[in-house]
Amino acid sequence: MSSNKIVFSDQDAGLGQVGGGAFLPDMALWPRAPDSGELLTPLMTLTERFLPVTFIPEGMALTVFIAVKQRDGEFNEATQRRYTVNQQSELETVRNAGYARVLLHRLSDQPLSPTPGTLLLPSAFIHFQAMSDEELEQELEDDDNGLEVSKPVGRPSWLQDPIYEPNRYLFLLQLRDYDIAQWSPEHEGLLAEGIGYVYVDRQARRGKEGDEGGYFFLQST
């Protein structure tokens, strides 16, 4: 269990970043929405230094992409529901639906420039900060529910039905909609005021460029 939480900064700690472009070696790897063919939006890039696992191939990173659409200045909830899970029975459907992708790739030195019209979020670098005694106590007091704070590893802060994963997948991090709003207020609501969860696939050890390295979904508050 980690005693750290995730905070954002304008200083690069080498752990990764939220927002910004995609550090892919080839534009052909950039995933698209299955219905419209539009390029997905990079939500975060996690470098090898961030990943506390041994099964990510050396020199590889993970980038989480989501489908983001706005209507009248607000984010389209119909799109958000494409990567939201409310019950265990919905997990496999959402994982395979194609509206969020966790891509395994080599980390390029510079982000690629997507086609015009692709939504990119303002970027901020990921840092770790120790939880306060009160936060850590809250994290430890319940066997089922973790702390409602953006954090690496630890336990998920389940808000609805818990998700029981086979051993193939490992909970990697959670990211709150609240925290996105702190670094980019104009993107409040991007995660439907919920918490996004990233799971990493242990089979990524066989990883090839452009493979699925895990999956992402939301549970709303």
Image (cartoon, grey):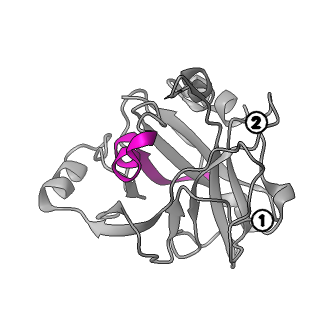
Q: Position of residue 10 (x, y in %)?
A: 41, 70
Left or right: 99 in relation to 83: right
Q: Residue 1: tell me if it is visible.
A: no
The residue singled out by tag 1 in the image is 207
Judge by depth and name the residue closer to the eye, 184 or 216: 184
What's under tag 1, amino acid-wise?
Gly
Q: Is residue 219 above or below residue 156?
A: above
Q: Secondary structure at mark 1?
A: loop
- The residue nearer to you, when weighing 53 against 100, is 100
Q: Residue furthest right?
A: 28
Tell me, yes or no, whether the two marked residues, 2 and 1, touch with CB atoms within 8 Å: no
User: Which of the 4 quarters of the picture holds residue 19?
Assistant: bottom right
Please give the name of the residue rendered at 61% of the width and 31% of the height, measured from the top-left corner: 91
Decide which of tag 2 and tag 1 comes sooner along the chain: 2
Q: Position of residue 168 (x, y in %)?
A: 64, 52
Q: Which residues are magenta?
A: 169-187
Q: Amino acid at mark 2?
A: Ala
In the image, what residue occupies the spot 65% across and 51% down? Answer: 214
Q: Is residue 120 visible?
A: yes
Residue at 43 percent of width and 27 percent of height = 161
Residue 108's mark? none
What residue does disc 2 label?
Answer: 33
